[in-house]
Image: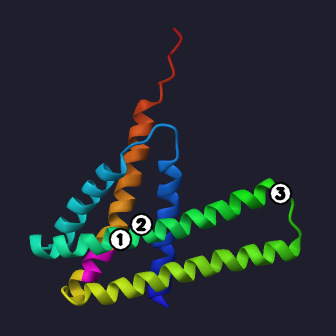
Amino acid sequence: MRHRQFAFIIFLLCINLTVIAQEKKPYFTKEEFRTKQKEFMTRKAELTKEEANKFFVLYFELQDKKKKINDNVERIIRDTKKKSSDETNYAQIIDKMINSRLESEKLERCYIQQYRKFLSDKKIFKILNAEMNFHRELLKSIKQNESKQKPKPQKNN
């Protein structure tokens, strides 16, 4: 049950980051984002260079697959907003959204099994925790940068 909740939280974070990435002024390119993510997660999970090299090939492959799933869900939502739907259509849309989440979770489970071939469960746990913390830290830094960029109201004397 906890794994399912954790996967759902990661799914929501990915959607949030996708929405942020679609804003007019991108904060990072995909490569910059992945470099920062790799550095942060390697440090927090205490991965050796060899472990990191093996892990991130698979990890970014998984992220690309999950992005395709998320993009499909976003397309379904956009298409639904464009046309009027009845209750039957909404039921089908909800089913597609839930099935996408399940597909994403199934992928994650499959990749965790691959990670276990060269990483201990303790390191995998640290990676999953680091991934969550990276997204939180990134969102915090974006919010801080936005608040710094907003013009301060001028005092009238």
Give the SS element for disc 2.
helix
Magenta: main secondary structure = helix
Left or right, 66 with respect to 118, comes to: right
Q: Which residue is mark 3?
A: 83
Q: Residue furthest right?
A: 86
Q: Which residue is mark 1?
A: 61
Label 3 vs label 2: CA separation? 29 Å
Do the residues under discs 1 and 2 have CB atoms within 8 angstroms? yes
Q: Which mark is residue 69?
A: none
Q: Could you tell me residue 10's position as x and y percent?
A: 45, 71
Q: Could you tell me residue 41's position as x and y percent?
A: 24, 66
Quadrant housing residue 128: bottom left
Q: Amino acid at mark 2?
A: Asp
Label 1 vs label 3: CA separation? 34 Å
Give the SS element for disc 3.
loop
Q: Is residue 23 visible?
A: yes
Q: Is residue 154 above or below residue 5?
A: above
Q: Amino acid at mark 1?
A: Glu
- Identify which residue is drawn at 51% across, 76% down: 8
The magenta stretch is 124-128
1 or 3: tag closer to the N-terminus: 1
3 or 2: tag closer to the N-terminus: 2
Q: Which mark is residue 64?
A: 2
- Identify which residue is drawn at 26% across, 71% down: 57
